[in-house]
Image (cartoon, rainbow, N blue to C red):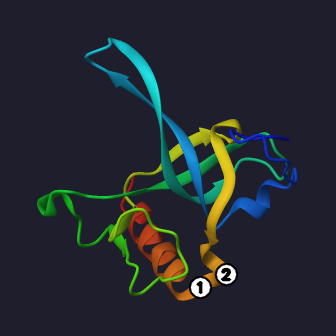
Amino acid sequence: MTNLKNQTISNNALELIGKLCDSRFAFFDNRAQEYKYKVRPVLVIGVEKDKLPCDITVLPVSKISREENISALYDYPLTKENHPLLKLKYDPSFVRIHKISTMHSKDLTFYTNSQLNVVYPDTYSEIEDKFKTYTSGLF
């Protein structure tokens, strides 16, 4: 199995859960009137199957420029001060717990900043608890 950077990886999809990875997100460029792609970090929280390729469930990790767009409940801050082992591009960055996405594993780069659930298990646990709270209000 290969990814965007043509790295060889294991076919075990379960190994992805808890990783911060880069992903390829499509967006529509109004000026060019076409779809383009940008690389965005994501936190993998689920996989469709035990083996790759498959669909994966992710939470985007974003810089939020406007403070009024930050959800106190569902945007979890990752800071260089509290998470020095993460290679964050923006400080702070936010795990957007209420912005759940599904993507195919072919759109994920398996280069990872960190296995968040191993390096910062308390942070991962807090994100998981907030996710459960958020999803309990759906339907």
Label 2 sits on residue: 118
For residue 43, above or below residue 24: below
Task: Please give left or right for residue 82 compared with residue 104 in the image.
Answer: left
Secondary-structure class at tag 1: helix
Residue at the spot 64% in from the left edge and 57% down from the top edge: 46
Residue at the spot 62% in from the left edge and 71% down from the top edge: 114
Q: Do labels 2 and 1 touch, CB within 8 Å?
A: yes
- Please tell me in which quadrant of the rendered image residue 21 appears: bottom right
Q: As rendered, which of 105 and 32 lies closer to the eye?
A: 32
Residue 124 percent coordinates (x, y)? 54, 78
Q: Within 10 Å of the Cα at label 1, are there few (<14), some (14-19), or many (20+) other Cα atoms?
A: few
Three-letter code for the amino acid on which mark 2 is drawn: Val
Q: Which mark is residue 112?
A: none
Image quadrant in which the N terminus is located: top right
Separation of residues labelled 2 and 1 (CA atoms): 5 Å
For residue 20, above or below residue 58: below
Residue at far top of view: 33
Task: Please give left or right for residue 79 compared with residue 2 in the image.
Answer: left
Three-letter code for the amino acid on which mark 1 is drawn: Pro
Residue at far left of view: 68
Residue 87 percent coordinates (x, y)? 52, 69
Q: Within 10 Å of the Cα at label 2, are there few (<14), some (14-19), or many (20+) other Cα atoms?
A: few
Residue at the spot 43% in from the left edge and 61% down from the top edge: 135
Q: As rendered, which of 136 and 24 lies closer to the eye?
A: 24
- Please tell me in which quadrant of the rendered image residue 138 appears: bottom left
Residue at the spot 79% in from the left edge and 48% down from the top edge: 49
Task: Please give left or right for residue 110 compared with residue 33 in the image.
Answer: right
Secondary-structure class at tag 2: helix
Label 1 sits on residue: 121
